[in-house]
Amino acid sequence: MQHHKNDSKVIIALDYADAASTLKLVNQLDPTLCKLKVGKELFTAAGPQLVEQLTAKNFKVFLDLKFHDIPNTVKNACEAACNLGVWMLNVHASGGSTMMQAAFEGVSKSAHKPYLIAVTVLTSMNQASLHEIGIESSVENQVLTLAKLTQQAGLHGVVCSALEAQLLKQHIKSDFLLVTPGIRPANVNQDDQSRVVTPSQALRMGASYLVIGRPITQAANPLNALKAIVADCVNLTM
Ligand code: C5P
């Protein structure tokens, strides 16, 4: 694994509809203090060109496209993502081990070897929605099963909530990355997130990286909001 100069734990979720509003925020940020997440909305609207613009500004980019398709297609999609110079990308673990291994092969061809992680169970799913698609195990067991499968396939980690991170830490090798959304600094709006933890709490619960959107993107001063979060990240005794 390569060494990253920027080892900030904060990944800012760029949940914007177009390149202009994204760049308006990004131009206020410092690439040594954060990484950036580009998801399906922004990527569909602004495309690979925006990703290349962000990497050209020295930001590490997590391309959150959650690939889920036949192995060969996912492998080729991962190769294409690597060619954009992304730092991290992801697939759905429910695509199975053959698909994940193919994804890993695609990533391995790239010279700079980005992190490849998997989504286990979307947090929008609950027991009833799992049942509906034919899965009878509990959400927790399904998360654990898919995280173990992800690790066996050789991937670098999973996306999970801080609460799941605690569970996974007990069953998964220690260098497995746990990338956690659902983070809110103390005293800020929870938005539509229901169970939230602070940055330092998430890190204590085992998170490797924190995905944070609106507390930074909607702040009156995004750079100051980011700096306060980065300061909380080193405050592990609170
Ligand atoms: O604005 P906020 O901090 O809630 O943004 C969180 C980001 O993490 C959003 O991009 C959201 O889609 C993503 N996410 C999440 N919960 C998950 C997986 C991803 O909030 N379980």
Image (spheres, rainbow, N blue to C red):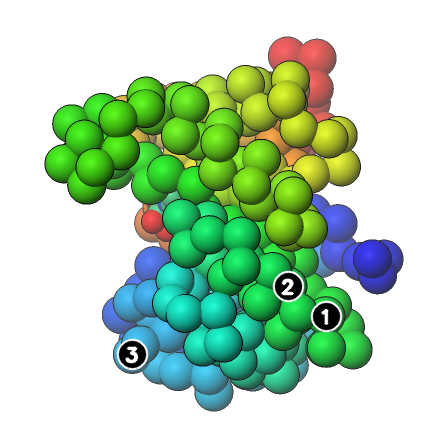
Of residues 177 and 26, the one drawn nearer to the viewer in this rendering: 177
Q: Residue at x 16, y 27 (%)?
A: 128
**Considering only vertical position in the picture, is 74 above or below 189?**
below
SS at mark 3?
A: helix
Q: Which numbered circle lies on residue 108?
A: 1
* Residue annotated with mark 2: 104
Mark 1 beta carbon near ligand 1 (under 8 Å): no
Q: Earlier in the sequence, mark 2 or mark 3?
A: 3
Q: Earlier in the sequence, mark 3 or mark 1?
A: 3
In the figure, is residue 122 to the left or right of 52?
A: left
Instruction: Name the quadrant where ligand 1 sits.
Output: top left
* Residue annotated with mark 3: 45
Residue 87 visible in the picture: no
In the picture as drawn, the residue positioned furthest to the bottom comes out as 49
Q: Residue at x 53, y 52 (%)?
A: 97
Give residue 44's quadrant in the image.
bottom left
Q: Position of residue 108 (x, y in %)?
A: 72, 70
* Type of amino acid under label 3: Ala
Which one is closest to the eye, mark 2 or mark 3? 2
Q: Mark 2 and mark 3 in contact? Answer it, CB < 8 Å.
A: no
Q: Mark 1 and mark 2 in contact? Answer it, CB < 8 Å.
A: yes
SS at mark 2?
A: helix
* Type of amino acid under label 1: Ser
Quadrant (top left, top right, bottom left, bottom right) of the N terminus: bottom right
Label 3: few (<14), some (14–19) or many (≥20) C-alpha neighbours in 10 Å: few
Which one is closest to the eye, mark 3 or mark 1? 1
Label 2: few (<14), some (14–19) or many (≥20) C-alpha neighbours in 10 Å: many
* Type of amino acid under label 2: Phe
In the figure, is residue 6 to the left or right of 167?
A: right
Q: Residue at x 72, y 77 (%)?
A: 110
Q: Position of residue 98 (x, y in %)?
A: 53, 59
- How many numbered discs, if any? 3
